[in-house]
Image: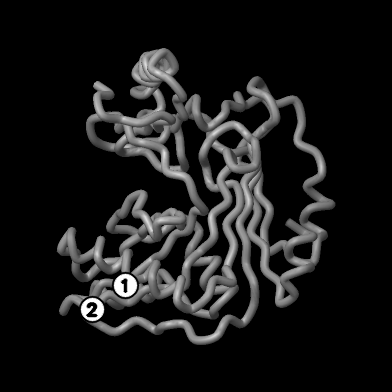
Amino acid sequence: LIKGFSFPLIIKPSGLSKALLVTRCDNEAELRESLEHTFKIIHRTYDAQKYPGRPGVLVEEMMQGDMYSVDAYVTHDGQILCLPPVKVTTAHSQGLPGFYGYHQQLPVGLADSEVEAAFEASRSTVKALNLSSTTAHIELFRTPQGWKIIEVAARIGGYRDMLYREAYGIEHFYNDLAIRMGKQPTMPTEPSGHAALVKFYADEEGYIDFIDGLAEGRALSSVIYLTEQAKRGDLALFAGNGGDHVIEAGLSNKDPEQLDRDV
């Protein structure tokens, strides 16, 4: 199973999003235990998330680096138009359970040469899959050895419509429709603001007694929306056990320091 692999390893379902059931394994014993646990609950998780298809599990070597993602418009004639990268801070990097995108933000402040290198890696991946007339979502790690692809999908990235609208003033959903109709999308120019998305899981697994602080959160100057994804009495599970986040917030501000304070 793991001949030639170097630990740590990551196991993850092939058809789920939001880092559900993604687990780090530091040795063979942890790998076997995690696979047994994953296969025990994977069908239930697919059903709860209403994902089609037959569940499957991938085992990968864990890359080290900073995570980013890029959405790209792929036109009917093969043009690949990359949108500005989004910085993704994972829960794992913050010492929290799971590998979900705890905090996403843009603009990212990378040098132009680094952004172009990320675009080139993204374009190469899209070309390898021969995609056309679609939006592609590419996840990457920025490593000391350069940009490495995590995965690519023929879809819009999560929350990108809000993030790109608030930071660059473009309508991502309309652009996605345009390229499927053979029309040119509207591309962003200079950023008009700063935008962020944050997700919160419960600190512990169990049934939710109460959710506090919503009114204070919604009063912050940067908050566009702050929503409850669960309610009192619901079962809160970590992402690695197939649970979803409890609170989600979209934020935007022209002042990046104020945005960071509000996050």
Crowding at mark 1 (Cα within 10 Å: few <14, some 14-19, many 20+): many
Q: Earlier in the sequence, mark 1 or mark 2?
A: 1
Type of the residue with mark 1: Tyr
Vertical comparison of 111 with 244: above or below: below
What separation in Å lies between label 1 and label 2 (alpha carbons)?
8 Å
Vertical comparison of 118 with 233: above or below: below
Q: Is residue 33 visible?
A: yes
Query: Residue 47: which quarter of the image?
Result: top left
Name the side, left or right, on which 228 lies relative to 132. Answer: right
Question: Element at badge 1?
Answer: strand
Q: Are marks 1 and 2 in contact (CB under 8 Å)?
A: yes
Vertical comparison of 238 with 94: above or below: above
In percent of the image, x 18 and y 76: which residue is there? 78
Q: Which residue is mark 1?
A: 73
Q: Which quarter of the rendering shows the N terminus?
A: top left
Question: Element at badge 2?
Answer: loop
Q: Which quarter of the rendering shows the C terminus?
A: bottom right
Percent position of residue 221, x then y: 79, 66
Percent position of residue 220, x then y: 81, 61
Q: Which residue is mark 2?
A: 79
Percent position of residue 77, x then y: 16, 79
Crowding at mark 2 (Cα within 10 Å: few <14, some 14-19, many 20+): some
Q: Is residue 107 visible?
A: no
Q: Nearer the viewer, residue 81 or 183?
A: 81
Task: Please say which color scheme the image uses.
Answer: one colour
